[in-house]
Amino acid sequence: MARTLTVLIVDDQDAFRATARLVIEFTDGFEMAGEAVDGTEAVRRFGELEPDLVLMDIMMPGMDGIEATRRILTTNPRARIIVLSTYDADVYQSRALDAGAIAFVSKADFGPDSLIKAWAASAESEG
C-alpha cells in the first residue's frame, strides 16, 4: 500500500467502535480519521473529514447505514464504504451493495485481513 488510508468508523455501539479502532491501529497502511454514532453524524463527518474509507454499521437509531451510504455516495460517488453487521448477510449484503458499498463484512469476521481484502478488491475494480 503506497500511502496511509484514513478511516471513519460509524457504529452506535461503543464496544464495536473500540474494536474497530484497534483493528485500524494494528493494520499497516490504515489510520483513524474519526468516528460517528449514527447515519446522520456519518454523513456530516464524512463531509468534514473526507476519509478514504468508511466502516458503516447497518442498523443504528435514526438514519441507518444503508441510507447513510446512499447519501454519502450522492455527495461523493468515489467514497468507499464497507458495511458491517451482525445481521444476516443473505438479507443485508445485497441491500448494502445496491446502496453502493464496496463490501459487506460480518462483524464476527471483521479484522485486519477482511479490511485489507475489502479495500484491495475495491482498488482492483477501480483500476
Image (cartoon, rainbow, N blue to C red):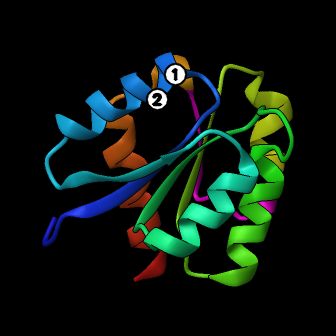
Horizontal and vertical percent position of residue 83: 62, 44
Is 39 contained in the magenta span? no
Q: Quadrant of residue 49?
A: bottom left
Q: Residue at x 64, y 29 (%)?
A: 12
Decide: is 14 above or below 58: above
Residue 99, disc: none
Q: Is residue 112 visible?
A: no
Secondary structure, mark 2, is helix
Q: Amino acid at mark 2?
A: Arg
Nearer the observer, 120 or 62: 62
Disc 2 target residue: 17
Q: Which region shows up in magenta?
A: 97-106
| Tag count | 2
Which image quadrant: the N terminus? bottom left
The kind of residue tagged 1 is Asp
Instruction: Identify the residue shown where x is 83% and y is 56%.
Output: 67
Q: Which residue lies under the disc numbered 1?
A: 14
Q: Secondary structure at mark 1?
A: helix
Q: Position of residue 119 (x, y in %)?
A: 39, 57
Marks 1,2: beta carbons within 8 A = yes
Q: Is residue 97 above or below residue 91?
A: below
- Residue 107 as seen in the image, left or right of residue 75: left
Q: Residues within 10 Å of mark 1 (few under 14, many from 20)?
A: few
